[in-house]
Image (spheres, rainbow, N blue to C red):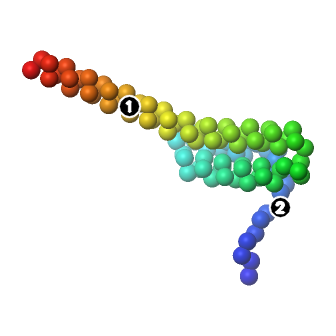
Amino acid sequence: MINNYDPPLTDDYIYNLDRYLICDDDDSLCQFGQESSCNAVLELCWGNYPEKDCNTLSETCKKIFIKNKKPKLYQKFVLSLKRIEKFTLLKRIQVKI
């Protein structure tokens, strides 16, 4: 029985960087999977491929991370602004009454 299968590292995993940037901006599940895959390949890259190529792959992995985190930070910022506006509006209503 096969308990663990690690597919062989191929040039496509290292040099076809577009494969890691396929997710929509709002698809965090896809982004998480792509980020995990990219980082797993990156670990295998070091020592098996030129450092320059691994650095390029590393930058691609960082782009996935930034893309994955940016919408959530933006959403928190917008939610905070809405709460501030609502609080300010309620204060104005209380002052008028």
Left-right relation of 30 to 20: left
Residue shown at 70%/53% (left/top)? 37
Callout 1 amino acid: Ser
> Mark on residue 9?
none
**Residue farthest to the bottom, as pictured:** 1
Q: Tell me where residue 81 sits by quadrant.
A: top left
User: Who comes first in sequence, dot 1 or dot 2?
Assistant: 2
**Residue farthest to the top, as pictured:** 96
Residue shown at 76%/41% (left/top)? 58
Residues packed near mark 1 inside 10 Å, few (<14), some (14 to 19) or many (20 plus) = few
> Where does residue 60 sit, x and y in percent of width and height?
72, 39
Would you name the residue on which mark 2 appears?
8
> Where does residue 94 sit, x and y in percent of width and height?
14, 23
Would you name the residue on which mark 1 appears?
80
Residue shown at 44%/35% (left/top)? 76
Q: Is residue 12 visible?
A: no
> Where does residue 78 sit, x and y in percent of width and height?
41, 30
> Where does residue 90 sit, x and y in percent of width and height?
20, 26
Q: Report the Cα–Cα distance between label 1 and label 2.
A: 46 Å
Is the residue 73 above or below the residue 48 in the image? above
